[in-house]
Amino acid sequence: MIENFFMGGDNSLIGTITSILFFLFIIFYQKIMMLQTIWRAEKDLKKLDEYTKKAEGYVMQCISKKPNKKLKHDVRNFMNFFISTPVDVDPYGILNKIEHVMNQSERRFNYFVDTIAPNHNAAEKANLKFGLIGALGVFEIYKVVRHLIITVKKSNNIQMAFILQMYLPLLLKMAKGNVKATQAFVKGIPIGDAIGPMVAASFKTENGEEVAKDVLVSKETIEGKTVFVMKAKGPGASLGKIGKAVEEIRERESIEHIITVDAAGKMEGEITGSIAEGVGVMMGGVGVERSKIEEVALKHDLPLDGIAIKMGVMEASATLPEKVYKAQEPARDITKRLIKEAKNGNILLLGVGNSCGIGNTKSSLNGLDVKLKP
């Protein structure tokens, strides 16, 4: 019986070969899968290396058309820059710690940009800084994937290999998005996240006053009401110290209502450029600036209305999509309705997001559609 099982009856040779192959497959299946997974991962690692070089190239070209060896060396060294996050075992005061670390990070970036591009103007330096941040993001993904591949090889851990294989498509997508963001920043082209400042700028008739670092606010009349319109200073890439600016303008102008406009990540199935209304502060990031605005609203019992313009995660950091650009007018209409519905008193309209490529007045937006064409 056993002999028949292995010899396969009349087809003894075929049965024997099949049985041997079957047992070999069982024995070496894990090894084959491991080799196949590593091979695919290494192919993706080469792509990530290409993305890193591409992002680095955009930064180099922004600094100089003919970068010398020293410049290349300095930029490559800076690509290893990192931030050590504060201890959060005791959450008390953690936001202040995060803010301090972020301020120190900004200081280092500003100093490096001033060193490698001393002849650039303020807007160009701001764009270069965010371009560097994008390039660092690509390089960091490359280093993480390289580390995981080497770890899988050393440990021969099939489970870790499967996890790496599962996450690689997402990591590649993120890296590609960062490359596009780097290109947009160094060229001063608006990205998806710029829709908030764009909506705010469309209501501004003048630059206004800089009430906090890289934040401008102007006094406007909209729907017969006094509205203070605030956005990060453009057209250079900037997020500004929005929280500090809100604290300042509330004390000076007795703001009674806050409206925020920002980009928001969409779920699968939602349409890019669709708009949702809500309450609260429409703002992403690490939470420092958002927390300050919420503290002001809580302290003075201010209504918080929000407008979220939906887009994919990668679209937020890539060149402003046409559907998002066209969402500007519907967003303006909703903003005007919210202003009209608000009770009497000064209103603060806050355009949240990166101001890359976005000027500070309505007139500065003229011709932007042409600039966004591929």
Image (tube, grey):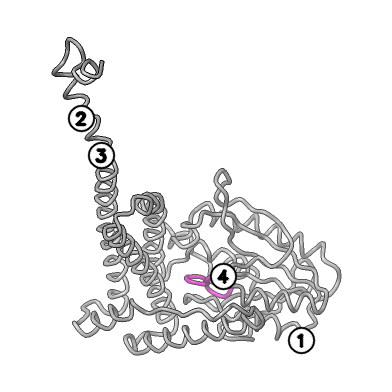
Above or below, 20 relative to 187 = above
Label 3 vs 4, first from the N-terminus: 3
* Callout 1 crowding tier (Cα within 10 Å): few <14, some 14–19, many ≥20: few
Residue 7, image x, y percentages: 18, 18
The C terminus, quarter of image = bottom left
Of 161 and 135, nearer the camera is 161
Q: Amino acid at mark 3?
A: Ile
The N terminus, quarter of image = top left
Horizontal side of residue 259 vs 9, given as left or right: right
**Which mark identifies residue 251?**
1
Residue 329, image x, y percentages: 62, 57
Q: Between marks 1 and 4, how big is the CA–CA gap?
A: 25 Å
Label 2 vs 3, first from the N-terminus: 2
Do the numbered discs 3 and 1 sit on residues whose CB atoms are within 8 Å?
no
Give the magenta-colored segment's residue range: 354-362
**Residue, far top:** 10
Do the numbered discs 2 and 1 sit on residues whose CB atoms are within 8 Å?
no
Task: Look at mark 3 in the image and give the residue it sits on.
Answer: 27
Mark 1 secondary-structure assignment = helix
| Mark 2 vs mark 4: in front | 2
Of 122 and 168, nearer the camera is 168
